[in-house]
Amino acid sequence: MKGFKFAGVHAGIKKKKNKDLGLIYAENPASSAALFTRNQVVAAPVILGRKTMEKGILQAVLVNSGNANCFTGEQGVDDARQCAGLVAKALDIDPDHVLVSSTGVIGAPLPMDKFEAGIPEAVACLDSCTLEDFAQAILTTDTCTKMMSLQGKIITSGDEKDFTVTGVAKGSGMIRPDMATMLAYVFTDAGISSDLLKQALTHAASRSFNRITVDGDTSTNDTLVCMASGAGQAVVGNDESFEAFQAVLDDVCYGLAKNIVKDGEGATKVASITVKGALSQQDAFKAAEAIAHSPLVKTAIYGQDPNWGRITAAAGRSGATVDQNKMDLYFDHVPLVQKGQWQGKESEIQAAKVMKQDEISIVLDLNLGEGRDQFLFCDFSENYVKINADYRS
Amino acid sequence: MKGFKFAGVHAGIKKKKNKDLGLIYAENPASSAALFTRNQVVAAPVILGRKTMEKGILQAVLVNSGNANCFTGEQGVDDARQCAGLVAKALDIDPDHVLVSSTGVIGAPLPMDKFEAGIPEAVACLDSCTLEDFAQAILTTDTCTKMMSLQGKIITSGDEKDFTVTGVAKGSGMIRPDMATMLAYVFTDAGISSDLLKQALTHAASRSFNRITVDGDTSTNDTLVCMASGAGQAVVGNDESFEAFQAVLDDVCYGLAKNIVKDGEGATKVASITVKGALSQQDAFKAAEAIAHSPLVKTAIYGQDPNWGRITAAAGRSGATVDQNKMDLYFDHVPLVQKGQWQGKESEIQAAKVMKQDEISIVLDLNLGEGRDQFLFCDFSENYVKINADYRS
């Protein structure tokens, strides 16, 4: 990716010998935008990060895993600021252009000695490390790295300019709309103002990171950042070039979000629930969210059971207006319920076949209006319980 | 219980040989009140039951397990009405005084032949059966029956009149405020008007059945009924006798609700979360509900881990106003967090000891106001997943 360098090292913040300190460096100060968790309990790096992002410019991002720097009081904010200072010094850049993110256990102070030693090591590694090293360094309960890269074109007066959008993310549990223990960093070589970038990022998040759930819990540290180096030839302005950029950014964010759900703690399947025909988009959102969060629906999917009663009952308690005699329900293209009536054994057999797939698309048509929304979610297995019962021990 | 008779038989509605048809009979038409699910998707017996309860009088209640008679269209309502008719005929009472309830799998029509044979059998059993038989007949995934009985006294001009309140309930999964696959029947020999009874029952439910959660899913069939035979000597009026009655009814409902949580699918522990010091009661409700529903909190309790970060983070995303630097958190009497600060290893060791208990009391003081609310909930184990992945197979 033109204009960016990456690093990932083991600094000893995690007990295990995995990489736990990642660094992003933009060769020049980059137009940037960020979205943070809406949880009222926020970690120190989010408190500091909101201030840092006021100017819309970043040149470096430091991310540690293994410690969330949350519920650490004033000391936590001071520690985050000190981390930014250490990065700025090592790279000889403005400390106000350094964003720090943390993910991991809540409530323990940052081990500052590990950062003092680890940051220069990460800086030294920028020329030899790759995005994969960074992607590894930010993982917690994730079982794999999540990266995605797509190209786009901007055509101005017949002139074609290519641009690239590349993203990297982490997240596996505590996933829910408004983001969760989820960190995502997206880069582009396109030139774009930080205001336009914020607008594009907000739109992309509303269709990706804010429409996924693993367990319905949000975290205190969620951060989605986009940095634009402008090192390529494409320039995004307030015209049709914006749409071209938005489309590629949407796809990268959706791809990353889907990878997070796929790697959901204990997940064996990815499902999408599309609610359409709702009285309003808000109603569609409510019904889709209730279904995607329902432990009964999620365990049924794990059990490969097209348990339509649980899906329709979740819609019924969601707060959305529903009429049980108008609902149609599809598993992929199999209509199991039509106008509230079960369609019989043959449909059930077909739906049960769909449930054996790794990816399942469920569509609930309320047949009341034009409202539509979609969630991505995963199933709930015994392993989710095992992972989360033992997390701190 | 004066004025009531009970029965429970095996009619063949369930695949297994368990009892699956229960009958309650009041020797005289009884002043009655009922609360039903607030889910918009409702089962046929709830549709019919709302009409039946308009007059506030019941003489019999028929309950089947094994089939929820939900998503069964007009046929389902006709079937429910036919069941009421069969009961009325067999008992020679008014069919408008018969309430029917169903619990079990959603979407299959009621096997009416089983009811035609089973209802006379249940009626024949009223003289020899006990409340325990009825309690068994209404169970689904429950592992034990839930019954509770308490006495109270009403003193009028120095004259002491005893009364009894006895309740029976079922419910194990799909449990959440506004009720779930939960059926509860409460009886008293006190005399009371149906209006006053409705008022008392609504209050009791708000502190019991509407403050419990197993998995956050509500069902389509939830019903809480209270019948007053007036066969005893105590009479409840719109005076201090009402408070005496309310107190006993509250305790019986709370006891039944707690038994439901204790028998939550896969549950190994019962926990209460009390949120106090909230800006309002609504805020306290929101925070307590978010904590009680959080899969991360529930799996931590299963893992005997005093994971305070998950509890405070759930409060932070609940929509309630919180200030992370003001929160106090207690596990029983152990203050693990004070003014947002972790109280160190010794407190952690003490809190970890509390977590080994079968019943755990968690108190979160937001230190912002006077709002207070409480939820009862259970932990989340691998067994919850197993039970619900395999439910229909």
Image (tube, coloured by chain):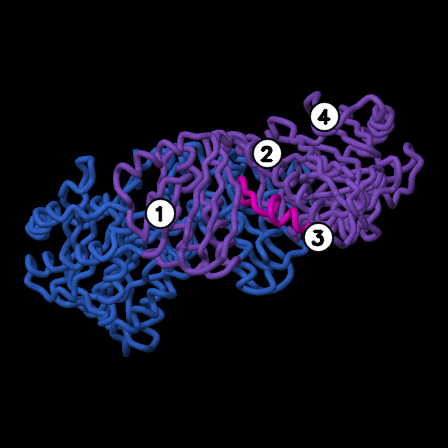
Chain colours: A blue, B purple
Label 2's element? helix
Residue at label 2? B259
Marks 2, 1: nearer the viewer: 2
Q: Is residue A352 magenta?
A: no
Q: Amino acid at mark 1?
A: Ile
Q: Nearer the viewer, residue A264 or B33?
A: B33
- Seen as rendered, the residue at the extreme front is B158
**Pointer 1 with pointer 4, Cβ within 8 A:** no
Chain for numbered disc 4: B
Residue at 63% of width from left, 59% of height from top? A321
Label 3's element? loop
The residues tagged by marks 3 and 4 sit, at their Cα atoms, a distance apart of 37 Å
The reply to whether label 1 and label 4 mark residues of one chain is no
The residues tagged by marks 2 and 4 sit, at their Cα atoms, a distance apart of 15 Å
Residue at label 1? A260
Mark earlier in primary sequence (3, 1):
1
Q: Amino acid at mark 3?
A: Asn
Chain for numbered disc 2: B
Residue at label 3? A325
Image quarter hosting the C terminus of chain A: top left
Q: Nearer the viewer, residue A147 or A260?
A: A260
The residues tagged by marks 2 and 1 sit, at their Cα atoms, a distance apart of 38 Å
Mark earlier in primary sequence (2, 4):
4
Q: Position of residue B116 (x, y in %)?
A: 85, 30
In the image, the segment drawn in magenta is B202-217
The reply to whether label 3 and label 2 mark residues of one chain is no
Mark 4: few/some/many CA within 10 Å (<14, 14-19, 20+): some
Dividing the picture into quarters, in which one does residue A347 lie?
top right
